[in-house]
Amino acid sequence: MTRNLALAPLWIAQIATKAKSFRDNPILGSATLNAWGLHVARRRLADAMSRHRRLRLAKHIEADEQIRFDELGYFVRHGALDAGHFAALRREIQDIRLPAREMRQGSTVTRRIGLDDLWLAQMPATSRFVKDRAVHALIHYAASYAGEPTFAIQTILAESSNAEADPQTLLHSDTFHPTAKAWLFLDDVTEDGGPFAYVPGSHRLTPQRLAWEREQSLSAAHSKDSMHSEGSLRATASDLAALALPPPTRMAVPANTLIVADTSGFHCRTPSPRSTRRVEVYATLRRTPFVPWTGGHLAALPPFAGRFAQLEMGLEQVLALSGLARTAWRPVGVTGAYEPAKI
Ligand SMILES: [Fe+2]
């Protein structure tokens, strides 16, 4: 209890940050405060700020792509790279072996190999994609921020799965404010290969969505679903119907397709009836939601720029060893993207 009281100033300070866990922060998770409108106020303010920032970021993307994104919540580019560039990038990723980490969620293992400048120096075609300002512009718009996205080679190794076995197969919103994830698929993603799915238009904060969020915020702290209680709210098919949202679109797409999504919208990895291995270049950008400016990203400045993956991995390990934070990620040593799971 004494320890809990000592943390109170931190919990209060976190109201103004991207902290999202109803369970870990008794203020964010308070049924009384949320009945008075705390979660709804954070949601509305974050939404207003993100719309303000996107107005400034829109000039860096094509007008027709912006219209589609505003409607759907994601960008899709088929044939994202020219054929020669894509073939060279794929070859580099097939051949290289680098320090990796893995995380198991039920029957699925996710492997990430952070693409810092040190490694990109050996991978010219991959580097060209990672440094592409036009790709960054899509990620920036989806995230509603400029700044330095974190890139990795990501492998999803899924045994034939169901919703119980892999929490990522339940429709969810990653957090309460816009945030970007991007995937360039190195191989064809088939219908039965557990494709990414997204509920079109679910990134928009409608009055129905706001009422649903308020309802969830009253009980989320005590949910049996740990991801839900941590602020990645889960939605059922009946929730979608109540929110007047369509069913999710399954993204079974050919190799060399780039998807960039605002993952505050509802999305999931669909369960796969067979074991699958998916390799992709993955990127993410999530920043604190309550500022009016788009720049000033620490990760874009020295000494962090180009070294973020290694620094993040090191920090995660230090926090885990000192007991200050949990991490599900395990370092697995030097590994190739197409190798079997090690954990
Ligand atoms: Fe997610």
Image: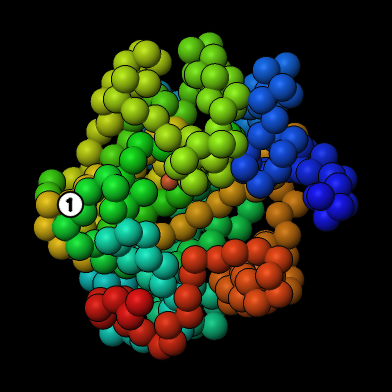
Quick check: 235 above or below 260?
A: above
Residue 75, image x, y percentages: 37, 39
Asked if the residue at label 1 sits under 8 Å from ligand 1, the reply is: no
Say which quarter of the image contains residue 234. Answer: top left
Say which quarter of the image contains residue 44. Answer: top right
Quick check: 115 above or below 53?
A: below
Residue situated furthest front in the rendering:
1
* Residue position for label 1: 272
Residue 280, image x, y percentages: 32, 63
Q: The disc labelled 1 sits on which kind of residue?
A: Ser
Quick check: 25 above or below 256?
A: above
* Image point (18%, 46%), residue name: 252
* Image point (43%, 79%), residue name: 100
Which of 198 and 273 lies nearest the eye of the viewer? 273
Q: Residues within 10 Å of mark 1 (few under 14, many from 20)?
A: some
Residue 320 visible to the viewer: yes
Which of 254 and 56 lies nearest the eye of the viewer? 254
Answer left or right for 330 relative to 321. left
| Quarter of the image with the C terminus in it | bottom left
* Image point (49%, 66%), residue name: 328
Answer left or right for 320 relative to 337. right
Residue 146 visible to the viewer: no
Say which quarter of the image contains residue 23. Answer: top right
Answer left or right for 35 relative to 215. right
Answer left or right for 321 relative to 8. left
Which of 66 and 176 lies nearest the eye of the viewer? 176
Residue 89, image x, y percentages: 31, 72
Residue 116, image x, y percentages: 54, 75
Q: Secondary structure at mark 1?
A: loop
